[in-house]
Image (spheres, rainbow, N blue to C red):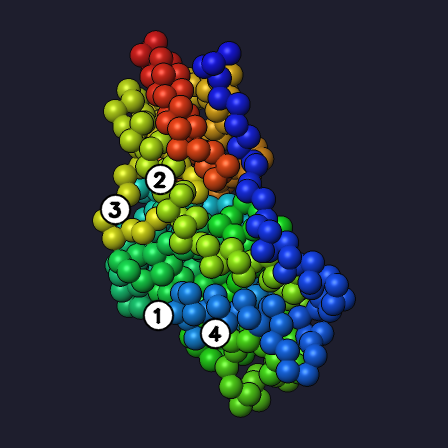
Amino acid sequence: MSDVFTGNFTQQEPISEEGIAAAVAVMRSGRLHRYNLTEDEVGEVSALEQEFARSVGAKYCLAVASGGYAMGCALRAMGVGAGDKVLTNAFTLAPVPGAIASVGAVPVFVGVTEALVIDLEDLAAKADQADVLMLSHMRGHICDMEALMALCDAHGIRVIEDCAHTMGGGWKGIPSGRYGALSCYSTQTYKHMNSGEGGLLVGDDAELMARATILTGSYMLYGRNGAVPEAEVFEAVKYDTPNVSGRMDHLRAAILRPQLRNLDQQVAAWNARHDVILNGLRGTPGLAVVERPEGEQYVGSSIQFLLLDWAEEKIHDALARCAARGVELKWFGGAEPVAFTSRYDSWRYAPSNPMPKSDRVLKGIVDMRIPLTFSVEDCAFIARIIRAEVGAVFQAG
Ligand SMILES: *Cc1c(COP(=O)(O)O)cnc(C)c1O
C-alpha cells in the first residue's frame, strides 16, 4: 500500500569504512585497553579526548564507558553522596535520576514548560533545596542558558549538563556543555555518535577533572591521558579518590574519531529532516508544534509535538492510526513506562510531589526519533501521515 511508510525507526547508519578500518587496526594490535600503549603512543582514546575537548572548546575531557557513567562520575567528583539532594528535570529519561540514585543521592524534580525545557520559575522555587543541578537537555530542547546560569550562580548551585541529546548543538554560539561546571555526553547507538556504548565528560575545573580521572580508573597512569590537568593537581586528590572503573577502550574511540570529524554534516542532515517534519505539522488541528527559540542551535535527531488536553483514548487512537501507517510515535504521558518513555512519577525510588502544570504538558508529549537512514522525502511523507491521522481524530471530536 503506497500510503504506508515502511522505514525502520531504529535503524542507524552503518559505521564508515574509515571507522571500520581504524577498529580493525586496533584489533590487529591486540591493545584494546586505553593504557595498553607503546612508549610514545597517544592511542585512540587520548586522541579522541583531545579532539572532543577541542571541538567544544573545553580544557579537559575524559572518555568513559557510557553517558550514564559520565553523570555518576560528575556527581561523585563534585562530592555528591548519600542523602544529598540533586535538582533535575521532571521531563527526562531514566538514566538521569538513575545516575543521581547511583551515588545514593535523591532527585528533586523540577517542572517542564510547554517549550519542553526546565521551568525556571519552578527551579527558583526549589533552588534552596540542593546545591547541584543535573540539567538534562531532554530531546535536545535547550532552555535560556544565560537565565539558568544567572539563577544557579545566585543560589550557589553548581550545574552538570546532560548533553546526551545536544552533542553538536549550542546556545547563542556556545557549544552545549560549556555553561555547566561539568558536562556529559553519550555515544550510545541512539545518540549523535555511535560506538554501541560510550560517554564523554568535559570541564574546565582542574581539580574536578583530576578527581573524575581517578574515578574512571586511571590508577596512577593519568599521565598517559590525552586531555587532563597537570600532574600536580593530581597530587592533591590521588590518594582520597576511589577507583570506580568506567574507562573507554581504543576500539570504541577508533570508531568515534571519524564520526566526530563528520558531526557538523550529521547535524545539518538531522535538521533538514526535522524542519521538514516541523513545517509539515504546523497548523494541524489539535496539535501544537514545539517552536525552536532564537539562540538555540538544535540538533533535530528527534521531534516532539503536543496533544494538549486530549483525552487518553483519543491519544491512543491517533497513535494507533499513525502506527497502522508505519509511523512509530512514542507517548511520554502514558501512566505506565513503555520502552524508553518515562516520567518522574514512574521512578518510585525517588518520591516526588505532584506538579499539575508539568503533568498537563507531560501528558501531551508525543515523540518521534529521526534516524538519518530516512530521506528528506521520507520525512515529508511522515509529516503528511501524522497530519492526516491526528487531524482526523481531533476533528471526530
Ligand atoms: C541516553 C541518555 C543518557 C545516558 O546515556 P547512556 O550512554 O545510555 O548511559 C542520559 N541522558 C539522556 C537524556 C539520555 O537519553
Front label number (2 vs 1): 2
The answer to whether mark 2 and mark 3 are in CB contact below 8 A is: no
Q: CA distance from mark 2 to mark 1?
A: 39 Å
Comes first in the chain, label 4 or label 1: 4
Q: Secondary structure at mark 1?
A: loop
10 Å crowding of disc 1: few (<14), some (14-19), many (20+): some
Q: Position of residue 312 (x, y in %)?
A: 44, 21
Q: Nearer the viewer, residue 77 or 63?
A: 63
Q: Which residue is mark 2?
A: 272
Q: Which residue is mark 3?
A: 293
Q: Secondary structure at mark 4?
A: strand
Q: Secondary structure at mark 2?
A: helix
Q: CA distance from mark 1 to mark 3?
A: 27 Å
Comes first in the chain, label 1 or label 3: 1
Comes first in the chain, label 2 or label 3: 2
Q: Which residue is mark 1?
A: 156
Which amino acid type is shown beneath numbered disc 1?
A: Gly
Q: Quadrant of the C terminus?
A: top left
Q: CA distance from mark 2 to mark 4?
A: 32 Å
The tag on residue 60 is: 4
Q: CA distance from mark 4 to mark 1?
A: 23 Å
Front label number (2 vs 3): 2
Seen as rendered, the residue at the extreme left is: 294
Front label number (1 vs 3): 3
Comes first in the chain, label 2 or label 4: 4
For residue 86, say whether it is visible: no
Q: Is residue 305 left or right of residue 293?
A: right
10 Å crowding of disc 3: few (<14), some (14-19), many (20+): some
Front label number (4 vs 1): 4
Q: Residue at x 50, y 81 (%)?
A: 229
Comes first in the chain, label 2 or label 1: 1
